[in-house]
Image (cartoon, helix red, strand yellow):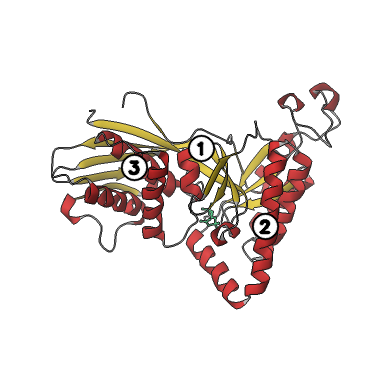
C-alpha cells in the first residue's frame, strides 16, 4: 500500500435547473476540465497537517483526537470533517499530511469545496487501502457537505465524482450521464463571488412566503430541464438557447439574477448567442451562453447539417460571443463534460 496518494476531481457548472433541484426537481450539471488535486501522505505522527493555499490556508495542524469542533477555518472544514468521519469508521493512531492544488480560482463557483472533498476522500480511502464504490464515495462526501454547509442538493459532489454531463435528482436519487458531444457553450465570469448558502436560504424564505408561486416556478424549471436533456442528446442548439432564456427568466423571478449577470447574458445574446443564463446560485459567479458554431462537430441549426465552409459567413462565430463577454466580464476557457474523480499516476 502506498503511503502517498494523489487524487483529483473536476470543477462543475450547472447548465439547467439550479435552485429547483433543492426542491426535488432534476438539474443538469457538467464537469469542467479544470481540476483540484489532493495529495494525502501518512505522516506516522499523531497529527493532521493541511496546506490548501487555493482554499485560503497555508499551514494548519492539530492532533487527530482533536479533529472537528467549532471555529474551523472555512477552507479546511470539509476536509477535516470528512477525515473525522473516516476515522470513526476506520480508527488510526497515526495521521496524515494533506496538500491541495487547484487549477481554478475558488471564486468562479466551480465547486472547489466539493471537488476538494471528493478528491480528498478518494485519496484518503486509497492510502488506507479501503475499497469504496462511487455511490459510497458520494454518500460520505454529500453528508460532509451537508454537515458543513447545512444546505445543498449534492449535484456538485455528483459532478466531481462521476464527471461528464449529468441529469441529476437530489440526493443522488438519479445520476444519469447525458451524451452531449462537444458543446458550443461559452462560460463568462462576472468577477463577483456568490455566496451559495445565503442565496439558497433567500429562495427558501421567498418560498415560505409564496409557496404557490414558487411551486409553479419550480415545476416550470423541471419541465425545462427535461426538454434540455433531450435537446442536449439531439444536439439541438437552437432549442437549448431558448430553454436557457426561459430558465434565466424564471431564475430572475426567483430574485437570484444580478445586474452583472444580466449584462453578460444580454451581451452574449447581442453578439449572436442563441440563449444565455446564469449558472449556479446566482448573485454573481458565472453565466453560460450557447452559440451556433462548428458544424464539423455535428451540430445542426433547425435540424439542417451544414458544412463549416458554407456557414463561414452566414452564422455568427462563437468568438464574437467570447469577445462580448470579455468586454464586460471574463470569458473562461473551459471545456465541459470532463472526466470525474480519479487517482493520479504514481499513486
Ligand atoms: O452556486 P453553485 O454553483 O454551487 O450552485 C448552487 C445551485 C443551487 O441549486 C442553488 C444549490 C444546490 O445545492 O443545488
Foreground: 273 or 90? 90
- Residue found farthest to the front: 173
> Which quadrant holds the N terminus?
top left
Q: CA distance from mark 1 to mark 2?
A: 23 Å
Q: Is mark 1 within 8 Å of ligand 1?
A: no
Q: Which picture quadrant has residue 289?
A: top right
Is 80 left, or right, of 194 in this rendering?
left
Task: Kindly tell me whether residue 290 is visible in this rendering.
Answer: no
Query: Which comes sooner in the sequence, label 3 or label 2?
Result: 3
SS under mark 3: helix
What number is the disc on residue 99? none
SS under mark 2: helix
Q: CA distance from mark 3 to mark 2?
A: 33 Å
The residue that appears at 76% across and 33% down in the rendered structure is 317
Q: Position of residue 52 (x, y in %)?
A: 33, 44
Query: Dot 2 corresponds to which residue?
Result: 221
User: How would you rate the neighbour count of disc 1 (Cα within 10 Å): few for under 14, some for 14-19, many for 20 or more?
Assistant: many
Foreground: 169 or 6? 169
Relative height, residue 346 to residue 224 (above, below): above
The residue that appears at 56% across and 48% down in the rendered structure is 168
Relative height, residue 12 to residue 283 (above, below): above
> Which quadrant holds the C terminus?
top left
Q: Position of residue 88 (x, y in %)?
A: 22, 51
Foreground: 108 or 1? 1
Q: Is mark 2 within 8 Å of ligand 1?
A: no
Query: Dot 3 corresponds to which residue?
Result: 121
User: How would you rate the neighbour count of disc 2 (Cα within 10 Å): few for under 14, some for 14-19, many for 20 or more?
Assistant: many
The residue that appears at 50% across and 32% down in the rendered structure is 339
Q: Position of residue 133 (x, y in %)?
A: 38, 38
Query: Dot 1 corresponds to which residue?
Result: 163
SS under mark 1: loop
Amino acid at each position: 500500500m502506498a503511503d502517498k496518494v494523489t487524487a483529483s476531481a473536476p470543477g462543475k457548472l450547472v447548465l439547467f435547473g439550479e435552485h429547483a433541484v433543492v426542491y426535488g426537481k432534476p438539474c443538469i450539471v457538467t464537469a469542467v476540465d479544470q481540476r483540484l488535486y489532493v495529495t494525502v501522505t501518512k505522516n506516522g505522527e499523531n497529527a493532521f497537517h493541511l496546506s490548501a493555499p487555493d482554499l485560503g490556508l497555508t499551514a494548519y495542524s492539530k492532533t487527530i483526537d482533536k479533529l472537528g469542533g467549532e471555529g474551523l477555518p472555512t477552507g479546511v472544514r470539509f476536509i477535516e470533517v470528512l477525515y473525522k468521519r473516516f476515522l470513526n469508521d476506520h480508527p488510526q493512531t497515526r495521521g496524515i499530511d494533506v496538500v491541495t492544488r487547484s487549477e481554478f480560482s475558488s471564486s468562479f463557483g466551480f465547486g472547489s469545496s466539493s471537488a476538494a472533498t471528493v478528491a480528498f476522500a478518494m485519496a484518503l480511502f486509497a492510502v488506507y487501502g479501503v475499497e469504496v464504490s462511487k455511490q459510497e464515495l458520494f454518500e460520505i462526501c454529500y453528508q460532509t457537505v451537508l454537515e458543513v454547509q447545512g444546505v445543498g442538493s449534492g449535484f456538485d459532489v455528483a459532478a466531481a465524482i462521476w464527471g461528464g454531463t449529468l441529469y441529476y435528482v437530489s440526493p443522488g436519487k438519479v445520476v444519469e450521464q447525458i451524451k452531449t458531444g462537444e458543446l458550443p457553450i461559452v462560460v463568462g465570469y462576472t468577477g463577483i463571488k456568490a455566496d451559495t448558502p445565503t442565496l439558497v436560504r433567500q429562495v427558501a424564505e421567498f418560498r415560505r412566503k409564496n409557496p404557490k408561486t414558487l411551486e409553479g416556478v419550480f415545476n416550470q424549471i423541471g419541465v425545462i430541464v427535461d426538454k434540455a436533456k433531450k435537446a442536449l442528446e439531439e444536439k439541438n442548439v437552437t432549442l437549448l438557447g431558448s430553454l436557457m432564456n426561459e430558465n434565466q427568466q424564471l431564475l430572475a423571478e426567483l430574485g437570484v439574477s444580478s445586474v452583472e449577470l444580466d449584462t453578460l447574458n444580454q451581451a452574449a445574446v447581442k453578439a449572436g448567442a442563441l440563449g444565455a443564463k446564469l449558472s449556479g446560485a446566482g448573485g454573481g459567479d458565472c453565466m453560460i451562453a450557447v452559440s451556433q458554431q462548428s458544424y464539423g462537430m455535428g451540430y445542426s441549426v433547425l435540424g439542417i447539417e451544414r458544412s463549416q465552409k458554407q456557414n463561414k459567413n452566414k452564422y455568427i462565430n462563437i468568438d464574437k460571443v467570447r469577445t462580448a463577454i470579455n468586454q464586460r466580464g471574463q470569458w473562461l476557457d473551459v471545456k465541459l463534460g470532463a472526466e470525474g474523480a480519479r487517482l493520479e499516476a504514481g499513486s
